Image (cartoon, helix red, strand yellow):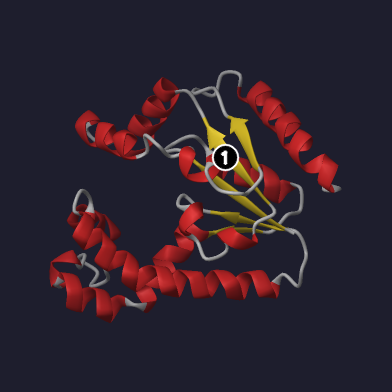
Amino acid sequence: MILGLTGTYCAGKNYVASLLEKRGLPVLDVDKLGHKAIEAEGEVILNRFGREILGEDGAIDRRLLGARVFGRPTELASLEAIVHPAANRMTQEWIQAQGGKPCVINAALLHRSAAYKDLDLVMLVDAPWLTRLFRAKKRDRLPFRVLAERFKSQKDFASQYFSKNSDIYRVENRGYFSFGSQERERKLERRIDEILSPLGLSRC
């Protein structure tokens, strides 16, 4: 059984992923896998985008690369054409290594993963817009203008999943500061129980 996990920008999908890991479910972070794919395809990427994206350590600086392609559909498509095949290959290798045991694919762009067609269900993590904005400002420390562009780019995020044939379960992750964090975790655990218990995936 393969479970999918995704979410809107700064909704807290990685926090939910950590709760799933506590239950004994192996979780693949596809976004981190993308970093490995960038390293693996480094020469191809440099040939396409130039050495201006190198950091002081001589490695590709993902922030510089991201700034190069953000808001430029053609450039972004070129990067994805290089990175996605490598990331998809690594994803399939990881799934096969699980030997058929229940596992979780955690990805921001889950619907574009080669594994999407094999998912048994998708958990979509969301949170109120203002909550996500404060989280994003604290975590990424970007100008509000840049954050607004990122939020705008995800305007139709959920519809990309609800328009497909997967079983979709929304997981609401409210809360911002540490105040009330234990209650927030309990609510998330209850919601995860509601989703997984019918599948026989109770807490370990």
Image-quadrant location for residue 153? top left
Q: Is residue 122 above or below residue 117?
A: above
Residue 78 visible to the viewer: yes
Whether residue 64 can be seen here: no
Residue 7 position, x and y percent, is 50, 41
Badge 1 is on which residue?
A: 124
- Residue drawn at x 57%, y 29% as measured from the top left: 173
Whole-percent x, y for residue 112 in the image: 46, 58
What crowding class fits label 1: few (fewer than 14 Cα within 10 Å), some (14-19), or many (20 or more)? many
Total labels: the figure holds: 1
The N terminus, quarter of image: bottom right
Q: Is residue 107 above or below residue 96?
A: above
- Foreground: 59 or 57? 59
Left or right of 109? Residue 153 is left
**83 or 155, which is in the foreground?**
155
- SS type, badge 1: strand
Q: Nearer the viewer, residue 131 or 79?
A: 79
Q: Residue furthest top?
A: 179
Residue in front for this viewpoint, 141 or 144: 144
User: Horizontal and vertical percent for residue 183?
Assistant: 67, 21
Q: Residue at x 29, y 60 (%)?
A: 62
The reply, left or right, for residue 190 in relation to residue 115 is right
The amino acid pointed to by label 1 is: Leu
Q: Is residue 150 above or below residue 43?
A: above
Measured as percent of width and height from the top left, residue 103 is found at 70, 59
Is residue 147 shown left or right of residue 172? left
Taking the spot 60% from the left edge, 76% from the top edge, the residue there is: 93
Residue 187 image-quadrant placement: top right
